[in-house]
Amino acid sequence: MPDSDPVPPRGADLKRPSVARVYDYYLGGTANWAIDREFGDRVLGRFPLLRDIAVSNRLFLNRAVRHLTKLGIRQFLDIGAGVPTAGNTHQVADELALHEGRQPDARVVYVDNEPIAVAHAEQLLNKEGDPMRHEVIEADLRKPDELWREALATDVLNPDEPIALLLIAVLHVAQPDENGTEIGPAAVARLRELLPSGSYLALSHITDDGVPDEVQDKLVDLKKMYDESSSSDVIWRSRPDVQALLGDFELVEPGWTWTPEWHPEETGPTAKHIDFATPAHAVIWAGVGRKP
């Protein structure tokens, strides 16, 4: 680890690259360590498009938050939020409120099970957050009832009002139980049950279904690299399997799309513009649904 790397928080695993920290590296963040950057550079050497894919996914998060805020949502539960970087959920919501001449009022609970992500989120919120409206907790998606209780215990979220649940680029990371069985879809189904009526679920997920042949080949290599080297295995679900994660929620227009195609008009004024040869080169399938 180079001298410039900060001392990691207690509990951080620096023996293998972390999916969250490598993603931070792709986005140009600073909460990553030598082992993450070395792995990220190897990945980008094989699949340089991945950095643009990561940025496009981040822009989807920003657009979803802006759109849902305009629909009247004022509560966000951001699970697998990762390491804080530009355009965090509370920043986007507050920026829109100020632009509309409103006092910022969005409430956000960030959730992650990566100690470094949680520690950096705490630092960010201590510096610029509002403790009455913003909180971060360390919790596990694989234990949805426990996660839900801890999120409500912050007193930031009101379970009687609609909440936007954000699962952005989370579920293509494997969620095994103690027996190694993948329980991600079941955990999401339970969270859908817990959400109050009128809530929303915004979701994005890598897929190898419907992508160009040359990109599909790269995704095969990418999965192998992550499964062999990183702290977590990855899963490329088909588009129908990704869509099933919304259950019976009513799709928000324009429905399921590649990340660049979901409400591009909601892109923030200072956001980086990403040009793909085709929208399918973004490889991440995205959608938002509303609970009846």
Image (cartoon, rainbow, N blue to C red):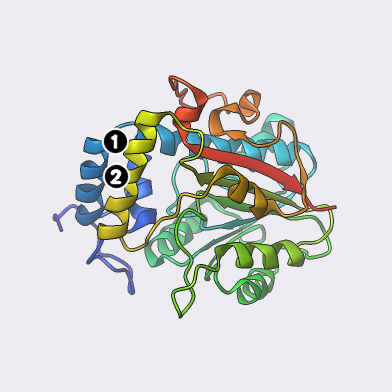
Q: Quadrant of residue 26?
A: top left
Q: Which residue is mark 2?
A: 221
Identity of the residue drawn at 64% across and 47% down: 243
Q: Secondary structure at mark 1?
A: loop
Q: Residues within 10 Å of mark 1 (few under 14, many from 20)?
A: some
Which residue appears farthest toward the front when viewing the image?
Answer: 213
Q: Position of residue 97 (x, y in %)?
A: 70, 37
Q: Secondary structure at mark 2?
A: helix
Q: Which residue is mark 1?
A: 47
Q: Position of residue 150 (x, y in %)?
A: 62, 74
Q: Is residue 283 left or right of residue 230?
A: right
Q: Position of residue 154 (x, y in %)?
A: 65, 70
Identity of the residue drawn at 52% across and 70% down: 140
Q: Amino acid at mark 2?
A: Asp
**In-front residue for pair 20/209:** 209
| Residue 17 visible from this viewpoint | no
Q: Position of residue 181 (x, y in %)?
A: 49, 72
Image vertical order of residue 74 relative to residue 115, above or below: above
Q: Is residue 97 left or right of residue 57?
A: right
Dots 1, 2 in contact, CB < 8 A: yes
Q: Is residue 155 left or right of residue 18?
A: right
**In-front residue for pair 162/158:** 162
Instruction: Give the distance between the C-alpha atoms of the residues marked 1 and 2, in whole angstroms.
Output: 9 Å
Identity of the residue drawn at 26% across and 59% down: 228
Q: Amino acid at mark 1?
A: Phe
- The quarter of the rendered structure image containing the N terminus is bottom left
Which label's residue is closer to the chain start, 1 or 2?
1
Q: Nearer the viewer, mark 1 or mark 2?
A: 2
Residue 135 has which mark?
none
**In-front residue for pair 127/25:** 25
Q: Quadrant of residue 5?
A: bottom left
